[in-house]
Every structure is written in structure tokens, then in C-alpha cells.
Image (cartoon, rainbow, N blue to C red):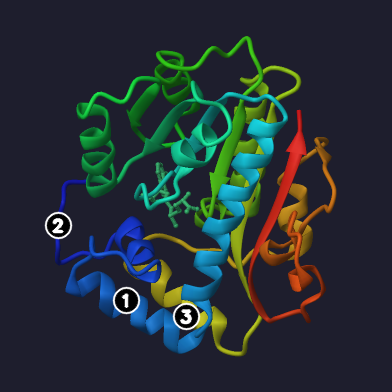
Amino acid sequence: MGELDASVPSIARVYDYFLGGKDNFASDRALADRMIEIAPLVPVITRENRQFLSRAVTWAANQGIGQFIDLGCGMPTAPDTLDSARAIIEGARVAYVDNDPVVLSHLGARVAKGVPGVTVVAGDVRDVPAIVGSVRAGIDLSSPVCLIMGYLLHFFTADAARDLVARYTAAVPRGSVVVLSAIRVDTEGSDEGFAGYSTTVAPVYNHSVAEFTSFFGSLEVLPPGVVDARQWHVWTAAGHLPPRDQYAIVGVARV
Ligand SMILES: C[S@@+](CC[C@H](N)C(=O)[O-])C[C@H]1O[C@@H](n2cnc3c(N)ncnc32)[C@H](O)[C@@H]1O
């Protein structure tokens, strides 16, 4: 896990800036602004992603699932996984996993305030056995869970993303659900933007719709399928909005 270095942008702090948060430094803002020049809707679709995650958690809790594993959880911007889950199930339990020191310090503060049922795991999501082992401290893996990988898989090649989803899915019981989202940008010049973000922070992949769909493997993707976040379980005219060339691509499947 990296130490906090304000001169080097971090994924979590760039994301925090997109969401209008205050936990970011000049280096993060400079990189985020370069991304916005290439794909102006990135802050908008990032908020749409967050709203989707909240709807997906609410939906899972309404299905009776009271345990959530949030891989690459990011800053606990309200409403975060715990807020959304507990709005439906009072005793819902959440395991947050991230490797960013700023994210971990925020989450640690939440646990230090004595919130029962919250487990914070510091680690690299690629180390699946270690992460699953630590998650067990707060999550009963013999009962269904909601596994969340929000805006995470664009940091992995398609092969690595498929492998990661398959390995985590194998660790959770039948009846669990898997929530995935990623950034999808079709604008001219977006590849350069992604490359800039990539070289400075981490590799970023602009996965195609087919690639994203393949991350679910043989899982049953639930209606409405793989869609723009604006179209997932919305009860307004948003479901009929015209397609855009920049969006959060999302889907939810049952194990
Ligand atoms: C773009 S943010 C998404 C936050 C949140 N899931 C959401 O969708 O709103 C990605 C998060 O994943 C974390 N992350 C990226 N690669 C990771 C890795 N290999 N292991 C653990 N966390 C990682 C980053 O630190 C960051 O907090």
C-alpha cells in the first residue's frame, strides 16, 4: 500500500475531486482537469456512477441481502454503501476494501467512531485470498453477499478484470449478487486522455461494451442488463434519455 504523497496524484483523490470533495491536492486536480478537457462529462458520469451504486445497494438490501463487500470502495462520500444499506436493513454489515492511504484514514475514522458491523480492509484487491480472509472478520461468507466493484475494473486489462470477478464470485455463496461499473468514453481523443491518466496514476482501460459484459462470465445478468447507469432501475424519464458518448457502464448479476 502506498504512502501519502501529495505530489503524486492518486486514483481515489482524483475521483474525490470529480465528486466535488475536498480530499484532493493540486497534483490530483491538475490531472483531473486534463481528463475533463478530453471528456467533459467525466464529473457528471462519476456522480451518475455513485448514484447507481447507491440504487444497486438499496435494491440488494430490498432483496434481503444484508452483507456488502465494497472492493475499491473509494472515499465514503454520502450516501455511501453503509448509508444506503442501513436505510433498508438496520443491521447491514459492510466490508470496505481499498489500498489508498487517504481512503483508509477516512474509513478508519468511521470505525474509530465505533460503527459496529463495519470492517475496513487495507490491501490490494488482486491479492484475493488475503482480501477474502480479512473480509471474513466481519462478513459471513456462508450467507449471500452483495459484491461491489464500482469504477474499479477499468484499472485492469479485460483478462485481469474477468479473472478478478471470477475469483471473487467463487468465494461467495449462491444467491449473492455482483455489482459492476466502469467508465466508458467514446469521444474523439479519449484514448489520449486515458493514456495521460494511465501513465501518471495507473493503467486505465476504456473497455468496450462487449468486454464489460464478458466480466460477468457465466453469471446471470439481471434486467435491465448492461446499460448506461442512468438506465439502471430508474423510475423517471431518465430511462428514455438519448444515448451519450460518455457514460458509466453498469450491470448487476446473480451468483
Ligand atoms: C475510481 S475509485 C471508485 C470508488 C467507488 N468504488 C465508486 O465507484 O464510487 C477507485 C478506487 O479503487 C481503489 N483501487 C484501485 N486499484 C486498487 C487495488 N489494486 N486494490 C485496492 N484498491 C484499489 C482506489 O484507491 C480508489 O479508491
* Residues marked 3 and 2 touching at CB (< 8 Å): no
Amino acid identity at mark 1: Leu
Dot 2 falls on a residue whose secondary structure is loop
Q: Please, what secondary structure does the residue beneath circle 3 have? A: helix
Mark 3: give few (<14), some (14-19) or many (20+) Cα within 10 Å. Answer: some
Q: Residue tagged by mark 1?
A: 31
Mark 1 lies on a secondary structure that is: helix
The residue under the point 61% across, 20% down is 171
Report the residue at 78% width, 56% height from top.
226
Measured as percent of width and height from the top left, residue 231 is found at 75, 63
- Between marks 3 and 2, how big is the CA–CA gap? 23 Å
Q: Residue at x 23, y 60 (%)?
A: 23
The residue that mark 3 highlights is 193
Q: Is residue 248 left or right of residue 122?
A: right
Residue at image position (75%, 66%) is 236
Whether residue 218 is visible to the viewer of this picture, yes or no, is yes
Q: Nearer the viewer, residue 109 or 174?
A: 109
Task: Check disc 2 and report the residue beneath it.
Answer: 5
Res. 194 visible in picture: no
Is 170 located above or below residue 99 in the figure? above
Q: Classify the position of the N terminus by image quarter.
A: top left
